[in-house]
Image: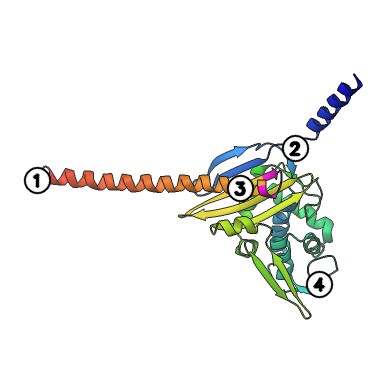
Amino acid sequence: MKIWSTIILLVVSINAHAKKPASTFVYDETSDVVISASEANVTRPIASLTKVMTAMVALEYDSNMNREMKIAGGSRLPAGNNLRGEVFTAMLVRSDNQAAEFLAADYPGGRKAFIKAMNKKAEEIGMINTRFVDPSGLSSSNTSTVGEVAIMIRVAALQPILSDTSILKHVEIKKKKYKVILDNTNKMLLAAFDEIKFSKTGFTNPAGWSVGMVIEKHGKRFVVVVLGANDKNHRYDVAKKLIEKHFSVIEQDIEQEKIHQEQSWWKKFLDWAVPNGNI
């Protein structure tokens, strides 16, 4: 009896700690249509996807990437003076947590005012179920839904400075004594798809593995977001399938349009040729 009680308690414990299914969202920006969504209303931690909002608020305050910032240690960048653009790059490419904190501290009024501005910006763009308490995403209290993260990704991708930086696969920043090497945290998907125009990943234990991207193909633009994948490979597989599925739909639409145009041309030709005895 004692053994069965132990087994039952173990099963209950496992179920209680079971991870939620991943949330996914695909939005066709060109047609303004949600293509697919799963677990879309689940509010969950978003980890380093937070840094997308951090980048937007910091950029609105000051778009000068050549201004020097004096930063402390703990970052991939050396302590001392660094260009603001280098801090942005460390944050967006390598998801440097301290870089996010430095940008927040650089804001008028400091970190507290910066976080207030993050929440204000979220509300302005329609992220009504989103909350930020830090600029890096380390706190599990930074929460949102997959659909609202898609809004944030879409808005951020409109800024060339942010979009161009976010998809850099490999960066070398030369310093006096050495180079700072930054490899993109989303390098697997960036290597697989040249069509990615904006990219940001996230991970903490409470949040799981996440990614937000903007993709362009054949003149069509869409947003893909995955929140709460089980591991890095799961995140990659889910995102890859979503992208490939939508690419397939685009290719089918193009083929159907081509067939329609050919049929339309042939019909017009017959309408002209048959009555005039030209066929």
Q: CA distance from mark 1 to mark 4?
A: 81 Å
* Residue occupying image coordinates x 71% and y 54%: 53
Q: In what element is the residue under mark 2?
A: loop
Q: Earlier in the sequence, mark 1 or mark 2?
A: 2
Q: Tell me if 274 is positioned left or right of 56 in this view.
A: left
Q: Amino acid at mark 4?
A: Pro
Q: Could one spot residue 216 in this view of the protein? A: yes
Residue 138 on image: x %, y %: 80, 52
Q: CA distance from mark 1 to mark 3?
A: 56 Å
Residue 65 on image: x %, y %: 69, 71
The label on residue 78 is: 4
Q: In what element is the residue under mark 4?
A: loop
Q: Amino acid at mark 2?
A: Lys
Q: Which residue is mark 1?
A: 276
The N terminus - image quarter: top right
Q: Earlier in the sequence, mark 4 or mark 3?
A: 4
Q: Earlier in the sequence, mark 1 or mark 3?
A: 3
Q: Nearer the viewer, residue 25 or 76?
A: 76
Q: Amino acid at mark 1?
A: Asn
The label on residue 19 is: 2
Q: Which residue is mark 3?
A: 239
Residue 217 is inside the magenta segment: no
- Where are the magenta residues, as a range? 227-233
Callout 2 environment at 10 Å: few (<14), some (14 to 19), or many (20+)?
some
